Image (tube, helix red, strand yellow):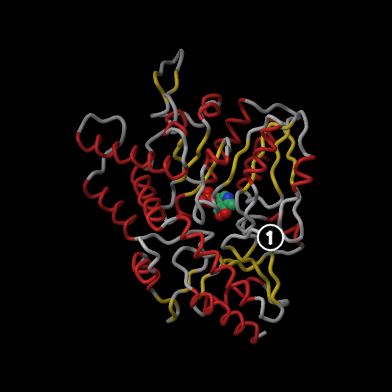
Amino acid sequence: MSYDMNKIREDFPILGREVYGKPLVYLDNGATTQKPRSVVEAMTHEYYNVNANVHRGVHFLSQQATELHEQARETVRRFLNARSTAEIVFTRGTTESINLVATTFGDAILKEGDEVIVSEMEHHSNIVSWQLVQARKGIRLRVIPITDEGELRLDEYEKLFNERTRLVSITHVSNVLGTVNPVKEMIRTAHDHGVPVLVDGAQSTPHFAVDVQDLDCDFFAFSGHKIYGPTGIGVLYGKEEWLDRLPPYMGGGEMIQNVSFERTTFNELPYKFEAGTPDYVATTGLARALDYVTALGMDNIYAHEQALTDYAMEQMATIEGMRFIGTPKHKDAVISFLVGDIHHLDLGTLLDRLGIAVRTGHHCAEPLMRRMGIEGTVRASFGLYNTFEEVDALVAGIRRVARMF
Ligand code: PLP
């Protein structure tokens, strides 16, 4: 498939709609992405023609639904380049994936006084999950500080390791600053200390190719809805040796081998972590979304979005009073900003009236806001279907709002 923008935009019907009588300019892709026809149609097709509960049925539909569900797992495995489908656990999203690791790793491995390293730029899901473990087990959170530009202080990172360090849990890409963290290098450092690493890939998987074997991460989490797939489905990749060591997360059907009141044994990987009926229609939708970005080419998506981001930063920098929050060397398609003393909420609300959808607020990263000495930002985040004309509309919109103040 070539990068034909007209064709791409036709694949996403919602992009053709208007809001307040203006063409929609959707720049909130960091929060969630729009869905191509192929995803919605595959899910509709499955509900109308295949629907049956997976894994337990001998009948035709159940077997067909199971086949689609397990094919989806193989599609995810290929997308991440995992060794085996045993390493691909379906969850509800990044948040649940992180909580699964925090809870089970917390129960099985962590003891009072043990330390987990996170960073100052984490999303709340990678902070609060560990604070819950902290409350139960008395662990200590160590925090990698960042620079004013929004890059991790790697010198400080190295100093955080000691004999009580048990895990590093860091984001691949910041959902506020756009910083692409050097996770491969950070994983090597952690492994030199014998410490495993969880990577939060919520904001990396939609924008560039990820290879979990090349990164050598021990766990990797991402959400379907941020990569053009359905809501309510996500993935936890875990190295088999780690998933084997961890206890189940929830109890119920699917995750057991045999149950009795005396003794229950658990299912093999990855089913040990998949209690209850999975969202097998959403897994099909996720697979079609991954097919879509793969056909377009992750490298092509990356190149397009980088060009858009560079152009947007250049154009926005000409606006009087423009202040970027996050100017790292390696920046992804996320731009957080403030203009003069205009409140971020006012700016976002007035842009909305012009048909431009951006996000405002703390972006589920309050500690980061505190570090930057601000309450919130306006955030424009790009997807594979955004155009240079839409960047022009954003820039013109910001100018117009700024003139009103
Ligand atoms: N981590 C990061 C970096 C995110 O940006 C987000 C969502 O914005 C999440 C985790 C949580 O993702 P979800 O709400 O899909 O579980």
Residue at 60% x, 47% y is 125
> Which type of secondary structure does the marked residue at label 1 adopt?
loop
Q: Is 297 or 227 nearer to us in this picture? A: 297
Horizontal and vertical percent for residue 26?
48, 69
Q: Amino acid at mark 1?
A: Pro
Residue at 40% x, 53% y is 294
* Quarter of image, res 54: top left
Residue that badge 1 annotates? 328
Taking 93 as reference, is 361 left or right? right
User: From the viewer's perspective, is residue 121 above or below residue 349?
Assistant: above
Horizontal and vertical percent for residue 319?
66, 80
Q: Quadrant of the N terminus?
A: bottom left
Q: Is 217 or 225 nearer to us in this picture? A: 217
Residue at 67% x, 32% y is 195
User: From the viewer's perspective, is residue 111 above or below residue 42?
Assistant: above
Q: Residue furthest bottom?
A: 403
